Image (spheres, coloured by chain):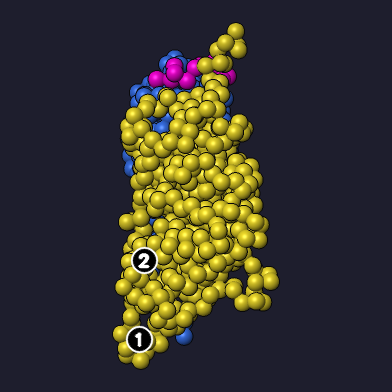
């Protein structure tokens, strides 16, 4: 039984997969409440399917890139839950999940970009071939620097139509696909380490200001 | 059918006698995981990111949050190993849910929820300040209630009346500008001493004269006492120290670092102890409890004990390792909440960066 979740975008998305199919899932879009939404959603998918937590045999977690605070909620939850249950935890690039969704849902039929909101007028992005294999990325850039007329999956395209005029579905990742690509061994598995792509904002101080 | 299955995931009610509680603290730059059984401390594992902040002269929230994520699981495992328990032995999980740095708090809160789900045990989101009070029971036994608690750290300077540490904590006064520990950091920087400033000022002060310079005592004039009897102000003191040091430098004379440190420290400790004792006397309370990082200051401990004894008031200060932020204090408060039968938190518990002190649990 695989428990999968992602908190790297405004969506808090959770799914439970029994090896053959997704048996329960939950997705809520709220960019400000990842910390409040994730744990109840995990508890809900377990309760809904009557699965005792001891039956979960692995965890898959989206490792971003994504806004840091929400991203960490997913990662610390995955690592801690895996430690308690003594099961493995696999990381998957969140943009790869969006790419798999787009290919499976048939919204793309050639090479494409995935772009999500990186805030500060930038996007997290990666490029993919028609089968959803990542060719380049993930990176963080200004939309204008990676503008394209080709299809662009993810919220980044909706936020910056000038740079990305051909927005295609889906807008947010869905943990059902995260669970499916891990089960199908279609995903590149990573360590559960966050893809921050940016350094913390911090400047070393100068001399103290004069007061007299 | 449904009920027999669902029971697998129900959280087990903890025993009220000698509960085994794991506490998580991530409100600032220390990743703390403590384990207590009743009032007995079994483990207090702390991973600090302070070295990563030193060159910035203060705690950088994003640096702290990243460090919490990396340290969380190893610190939980280290605490369990030290305590000689398995994670599954834990009866309840407690976590600081506020006040503190929002992003930092969130890492601890999310980890605590994952533990609660994974163990099937209740979750208690607790107030950081009340935890600083509760920690003393690990060293000196049951808390004296009511007592006056003075919490002094880099982020807080508060006087509280504690009638029941699990339900009844009332603020009497707090700083109106800088926290006491913040003043120590800023003055240390003026004197060219490293961050965090507290231990360095304390050490320098030992070879200096506390009466060399008469620095101001904030909010102690008759007029100020009318409105701010139990409040503190350290911003003016910090500016006075800066002015004094600049005047010295301008005249080409060397700055007597030890004397400045000792006189500054004296001014801070003088106001803190005076107001704490006044608060106790005003309410006829016999016990003062001091906590927070500044409580590790040797002059503050000495002066408080001396002055309180003269008024027939008892002072309790936990050992320095329990005064600074740690997980044991969170576990200690959690243990008290369990023992007194308080309600656990829900899984949608938010991290509340400005959690009011009157809210002991969330």
Q: Residues within 10 Å of mark 2 (few under 14, many from 20)?
A: many
Residue A111 vs residue B140, the one in the foreground: B140
- Of the image marks 1 and 2, the number of the one nearer the N terminus: 2
Q: CA distance from mark 1 to mark 2?
A: 23 Å
Identify the image quadrant of residue B361: top right
| In this rendering, position of residue B297 left or right of residue B270 | left
**Mark seen at residue A110:** none
Residue at left offset 40%, top offset 27%: B87
In the image, the chain rendered in yellow is B
Residue at left offset 53%, top offset 69%: B271
Q: Residue furthest right?
A: B226
Does B246 sit above or below residue A57? below
Where residue B284 appears, as percent x and y from the top left, is 65, 56
Q: What range is drawn magenta here?
A: A47-57
The colour applied to the residues of chain A in this rendering is blue
Q: Mark 1, mark 2: which one is toward the viewer?
A: 2
Residue A2 vs residue B147, the one in the foreground: B147
Residue A55 painted magenta? yes
Does B117 sit above or below residue B60? above
Residue B43 vs residue A58, the one in the foreground: B43
Q: Secondary structure at mark 1?
A: helix
Q: Where does label 2 land, which residue? A: B202
Where residue B51 appears, as percent x and y from the top left, is 32, 56
Where residue B182 appears, as percent x and y from the top left, is 46, 65
Residue at left offset 69%, top offset 71%: B226
Residue A118 vs residue B187, the one in the foreground: B187
Q: Residues within 10 Å of mark 1 (few under 14, many from 20)?
A: few
Q: Where does label 1 land, which residue? A: B249
Q: Which chain contains the residue that carries disc 2? A: B
Q: Which chain contains the residue that carries disc 1? A: B
Does A132 sit above or below residue B195? above
Residue at left offset 47%, top offset 63%: B306
């Amino acid at each position: 039984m695989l428990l999968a979740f992602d908190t790297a975008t405004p969506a808090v998305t959770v799914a439970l997969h029994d090896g053959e199919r997704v048996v329960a899932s939950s997705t809520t879009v709220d960019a400000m409440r990842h910390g409040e939404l994730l744990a109840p959603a995990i508890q809900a998918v377990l309760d809904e399917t009557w699965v005792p937590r001891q039956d979960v045999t692995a965890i898959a977690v989206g490792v971003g890139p994504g806004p840091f605070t929400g991203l960490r909620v997913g990662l610390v939850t995955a690592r801690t839950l895996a430690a308690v249950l003594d099961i493995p935890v696999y990381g998957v690039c969140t943009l790869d999940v969006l790419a798999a969704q787009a290919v499976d849902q048939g919204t793309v039929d050639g090479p494409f970009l995935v772009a999500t909101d990186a805030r500060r007028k930038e996007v997290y992005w990666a490029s993919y071939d028609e089968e959803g294999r990542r060719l380049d990325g993930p990176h963080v850039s200004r939309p204008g620097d990676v503008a394209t007329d080709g299809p662009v999956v993810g919220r980044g395209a909706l936020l910056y139509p000038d740079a990305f005029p051909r927005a295609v579905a889906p807008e947010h990742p869905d943990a059902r696909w995260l669970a499916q690509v891990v089960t199908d061994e279609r995903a590149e598995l990573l360590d559960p380490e966050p893809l921050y792509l940016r350094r913390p904002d911090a400047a070393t101080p100068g001399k103290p200001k004069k007061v007299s | 059918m449904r009920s027999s299955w669902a029971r697998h995931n129900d959280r087990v009610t903890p025993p009220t006698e000698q509960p085994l509680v794991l506490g998580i603290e991530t409100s600032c730059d220390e990743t703390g995981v403590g384990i207590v059984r009743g009032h007995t401390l079994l483990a207090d594992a702390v991973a600090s990111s302070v070295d990563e902040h030193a060159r910035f002269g203060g705690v950088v929230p994003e640096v702290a949050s990243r460090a919490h994520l990396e340290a969380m699981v190893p610190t939980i495992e280290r605490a369990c190993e030290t305590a000689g328990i398995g994670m599954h032995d834990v009866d309840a999980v407690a976590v600081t849910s506020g006040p503190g740095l929002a992003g930092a708090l969130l890492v601890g809160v999310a980890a605590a929820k994952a533990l609660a789900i994974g163990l099937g045990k209740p979750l208690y989101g607790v107030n950081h300040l009340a935890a600083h009070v509760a920690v003393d029971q690990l060293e000196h036994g049951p808390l004296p209630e009511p007592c006056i608690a003075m919490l002094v750290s880099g982020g807080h300077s508060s006087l509280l009346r504690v009638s029941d540490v699990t339900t009844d904590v009332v603020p009497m006064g707090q700083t109106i500008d800088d926290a006491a520990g913040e003043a120590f950091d800023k003055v240390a920087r003026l004197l060219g001493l490293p961050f965090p400033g507290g231990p360095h000022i304390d050490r320098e002060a030992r070879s200096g004269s506390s009466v060399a310079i008469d620095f101001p005592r904030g909010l102690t004039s008759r007029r100020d006492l009318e409105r701010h009897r139990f409040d503190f102000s350290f911003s003016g003191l910090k500016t006075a120290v800066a002015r004094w040091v600049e005047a010295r430098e301008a005249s080409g004379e060397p700055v007597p670092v030890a004397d400045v440190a000792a006189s500054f420290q004296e001014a801070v400790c003088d106001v803190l102890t005076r107001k704490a004792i006044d608060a106790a006397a005003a309410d006829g309370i016999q016990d003062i409890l001091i906590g927070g990082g500044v409580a590790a200051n040797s002059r503050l401990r000495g002066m408080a004990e001396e002055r309180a004894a003269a008024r027939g008031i008892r002072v309790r200060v936990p050992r320095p390792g329990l005064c600074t932020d740690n997980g044991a204090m969170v576990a200690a408060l959690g243990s008290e909440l369990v023992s007194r039968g308080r309600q656990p938190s829900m899984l949608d518990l938010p991290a509340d960066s400005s959690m009011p002190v009157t809210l002991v649990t969330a």
